[in-house]
Amino acid sequence: MILFKNALLSDNSTWDILVNDGTIVQLDSKITSSADTTINCDGRLLLSGMIDSHVHFRDPGFPQKEDATSGTKAALRGGVTSIIDMPNTDPLCVGVAELEQKRNIYNEKSYTNYGFHFGADARDNSKILKDISNVASLKIFLNESTGHMLVTDDIVLDKLFANSLYIAVHAEGEAVDKAIYYAKKHKNILYLCHISQAEELQMIQMAKSQNLPIFAEVCPHHVLFNKAEETNLLIMKPRLRTSNDQNALLKALDSGLIDTWGTDHAPHLISEKEEKLTYGIPSIEFSLELLLTLSKEMNWSYDRVAKLYSANPRQIFKISKKGRIAQGYDADFVLIEQDTPYVIQESDVISQCGWTPYLGRKVSANIHSTYIGGEEVYNKEHKTFNKSKYTKELYYER
């Protein structure tokens, strides 16, 4: 038994939480049950562990940039206890064997809970989609991608939508409307990755007004930077947009039009970024702290933060027993010093790539420690990482 005492939850209530065998078994204002371990949260903010639905951990294929170990450790440092990895690794995750290869890698190396988006193949892998089990979605690239993942043939695209219920897309500009069209036609649940432009938000607003199951993700970089700040290091897909787009994203977050906060964590070495045009930046270590800082500036509640980065991903992808502090749910937590600002330093970087675009930025909150199944897996003060016996592949209740 593990007892978390005096925890401030996202609704500003204070509770004791009793954990047994990795699961929350009791919440009460005061729990007197004996426990093997007692953790005094001392009024710190305790949130359900973050769920990052959009990461590129480069394993297999590019371990010099990131592997499952370094990526999931970086996630824990950022309060993220569950990640869903994208399919454009090497080999591309567009077949049964490639998916099983990734499962084996993460089963051995991951420090967080983990799941996978399966990749659509432009050469048409729609026939095998019924054989693919327990994935978050079929990821379709409608704009620039690597290898043979960019789908431009409308006949193939129609088959892909027809054979998979959950679809995630890389879609920019008019491609957003195209994705919504096919999702409406085939009654898909559609997840729009890294929305970055005001015109895309208008398309999403229209789709949601029709009660379509359309969900939109925004990334920290598109909210915190704009096109005027672009450098060789600050290049990703989609590219940084105008200040007007940036403001539109903020308004969409404020209104609730945006459903999730996902990093699109896509690390490259600085030498690779400086040598040639290379898309992608790292960010998962600091994403929650950046969101908490933004929420303070925007006067949002902690509950808004918890929904964007934990509860909503759980609900959208139907992830079992994650993303909520309630009896019967997994005891995955992040403990936060909510009023302890600090400036991000190079020594805070965990990602294998060794750098961050947020160097020198002041954040208003500080990740204290992270837990999976009630077991401490990261402690900032001691700079320690541990594997929990409760770490596992995500399961989707569909």
Image: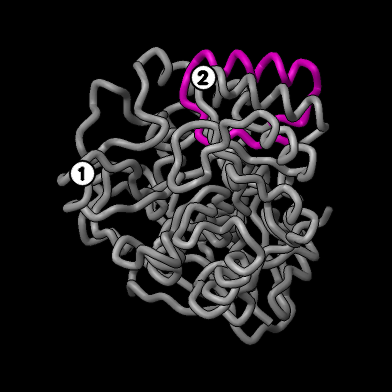
As helix, strand or loop, the secondary structure at mark 2 comes to loop
Q: Percent position (x, y) of residue 307? A: 63, 41
The residue at 51%/72% (across/down) is 110
Tag 1 near tag 2, CB within 8 Å: no
Q: Which residue, given by chain and number where applicable, does mark 1 sit on?
A: 360
Magenta range is: 189-214
The residue at 78%/25% (across/down) is 184
In terms of depth relative to the viewer, which is nearer, 135 or 256? 135
In the shown orientation, is residue 117 left or right of residue 131? left
In the shown orientation, is residue 100 left or right of residue 299? right
Q: Amino acid at mark 1?
A: Gly
In the shown orientation, is residue 161 left or right of residue 38? right
Query: Could you tell me if residue 73 is visible in this image?
Result: no
The residue at 72%/80% (across/down) is 21
Q: How is the image coloured?
A: one colour
Q: Which residue, given by chain and number where applicable, does mark 2 sit on?
A: 173
Eye-nearest disc, 1 or 2: 2
Question: Within the image, what quadrant is residue 159 found in?
Answer: top right
Which is nearer the N-term, disc 1 or disc 2? 2
